[in-house]
Image: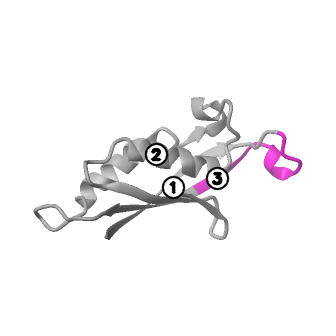
């Protein structure tokens, strides 16, 4: 098994509904996202996937969250915009656009240098 690891970031604001504390108020984060892709076999060039292509695909998905108010994004009209839910949404969207043979192993989203949440199946 091979893994490809991509780290990226974006900035966004949110507030947690029904949360008792400061995070109930509007606030922002500089989110860091770590994506781990996996494949059993390498392509003819000896890669899981070209880093350029992986970064482009991840960037397109994350682009809709960048500099946004997460609570206004359709995914978060029902779901609370927690770091856990953000990781799960990114994972789900990413797994639907990867080339054959490449799978998402895990998506970890960090809301600060010390706090993050991961989603994997």
Q: Secondary structure at mark 3?
A: helix
Q: Please tell me how crowded label 2 is: few (under 14), some (14-19), or many (20+) other residues with Cα within 10 Å.
A: some
Q: Marks 3 and 1: in contact by CB < 8 Å?
A: no
User: What is the magenta range?
Assistant: 18-30
The label shown at residue 121 is 1
At x 40% / y 47%, what residue is drawn? 95
Q: Would residue 70 appear left or right of 64 to someone viewing this image? A: right
Residue 6 position, x and y percent, is 39, 63
Q: Please tell me how crowded label 3 is: few (under 14), some (14-19), or many (20+) other residues with Cα within 10 Å.
A: some
In the depicted structure, whether residue 112 falls above or below residue 102: below
Q: Would residue 34 appear left or right of 57 to someone viewing this image? A: right
At x 51% / y 55%, what residue is drawn? 121
Cα distance in 3D space between marks 3 and 2:
14 Å
The label shown at residue 62 is 2
Q: How many marks?
A: 3
Camera-side mark, 1 or 2 = 1
Camera-side mark, 3 or 2 = 3
Q: Secondary structure at mark 1?
A: loop
Residue 116 position, x and y percent, is 63, 63
At x 66% / y 70%, what residue is drawn? 114
In the depicted structure, whether residue 60 falls above or below residue 44: above
Mark before the other along the chain sequence, 1 or 3:
3
- Residue that carries the numbered disc 3 in the rendered image: 83
The label shown at residue 59 is none
């Amino acid at each position: 098994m091979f893994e490809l690891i991509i780290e990226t970031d974006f900035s966004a604001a949110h507030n947690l509904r029904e949360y008792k504390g400061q995070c109930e108020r509007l606030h922002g984060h500089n989110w860091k996202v770590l994506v781990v892709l996996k494949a059993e076999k390498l392509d003819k060039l000896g890669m899981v996937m070209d880093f350029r292509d992986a970064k482009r695909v991840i960037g397109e998905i994350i682009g809709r969250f960048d500099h946004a108010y997460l609570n206004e994004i359709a995914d978060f009209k029902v779901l609370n915009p927690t770091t856990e839910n953000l990781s799960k949404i990114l994972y789900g969207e990413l797994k639907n656009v990867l080339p054959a043979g490449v799978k998402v192993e895990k998506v970890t989203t960090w809301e600060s240098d010390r706090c993050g949440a991961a989603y994997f199946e």
